[in-house]
Image: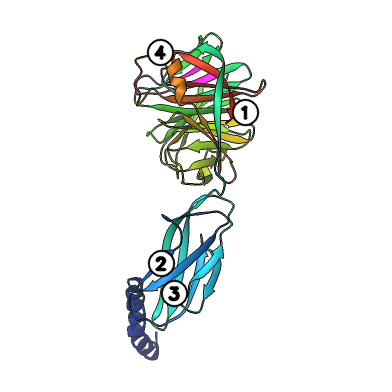
Amino acid sequence: MTSTAKHLILLLLPIFLISCGDTIKLDKNFSIETNATKNSIKNGEELTISVIPKKDIIIDSVMYALDGKRLGGKNSLKKFTSIIKIDRLGQHQLTAEVFTDNGAALFTKKINILSPTPPKLYGYRIINRYPHQTDAYTQGLEFVGDTLYESTGQYGKSKLRKLNYETGEVLKEVALDNNYFAEGMTILDDKIYQLTWRENVGFIYDKNTFEKTGTFSYNSSKEGWGLANDGNIIYKSDGTSKIWSLNKSNLSEQNYIEPTDNKKVTSKLNELEWVNGKIYANNYQVDLISIINPNTGAIEGIVDLRSLKDQVQEGLDPANDVLNGIAYKENENRLFVTGKHWNTLFEIEIFEK
């Protein structure tokens, strides 16, 4: 490096440091505010954004973006408005980049974009009752043809089962090691995929022999809760507000939706089932089923099953022995539900209230 170049760097370095220092100070001198009540706004509504200065700072312009996609800008601190239209509901990141003579500052704010339409409310009627093993802490339930498969949980008691749904007879089962707490399961291409709760691993079995053929790890998702599939994509809940789409080849998380109604983003969705193009998700410890659009995350319906526990045996733990099994018999268009340690598997029909 020449002496001239070294001299130039020494001259420019203080300017760079001052610029960086001003940017840091700017971050503390503005706040971002919106018209979103409790940081929530419905899809299709007008969002108003304001950048509020805490000191007398002259600004050049402000640029606004949602999830990195530009919304527009202003050459002043006047309110900026934009109609919000997005494909995926749930939590999004709003940013405002403020430019001044002293530098620039980037501000972020989380905002929930809700469904503009309230979910339809559904009741149920019982069509049939079948025996269900009371030792089953049901975590996953799925039909293949006329055969029912079940994943049961708890440490030291976790199993994968094949059942005669009409009699409750266990036709085949395999137990997990005592250090695994089994969760949801789904079946695709003659493979059974079973989650564990906090062990960060899922198991793959041959559907016919129950031989364990592989494992998969969780990456972006937090825990293992529920599984379902649409014949191509595997869906996974993890106890958060997210339902993940998994690549069926390697079970890696590709993207996610956040189930959302017209009031809030919903979390703790547990057992999942694919029913006529929708995801049916059990609301953990509430005995409700959410009917979810798999593309947008919109909760389009709520099935109220809270009175169903009155139809099973007494003495259950109300906090743990809850509704947590949904199985759709696609070849006959029949819907079945049960719960943890329940003595009955119910065939139900739902109707709009």
User: Which mark identifies residue 98?
Assistant: 3
Q: Residue furthest bottom?
A: 4
Mark 3–mark 1 contact, CB under 8 Å? no
Q: Nearer the viewer, mark 3 or mark 2?
A: 2
Disc with the residue nearer the chain's start (3 vs 2): 2
Q: Which residue is mark 1?
A: 189
Going by the numbered disc 3, the residue's amino acid type is Val
Of discs 4 and 3, which sits in the foreground? 4
Q: Is residue 303 above or below residue 49?
A: above
> Callout 2 environment at 10 Å: few (<14), some (14 to 19), or many (20+)?
some
The spot of residue 280 in percent (x, y) is 55, 32
**Can you tell which of label 3 and label 1 is closer to the viewer?**
3
Task: State the mark number for residue 32.
Answer: 2
Q: In the image, what residue occupies the spot 67% across and 20% down?
A: 332
Residue 320 image point, x, y percent: 36, 25
- Where is residue 204 shown, x and y percent of the image? 51, 28
Q: Which residues are magenta?
A: 149-161
Question: Residue at position x 47%, y 75% from top?
Answer: 78
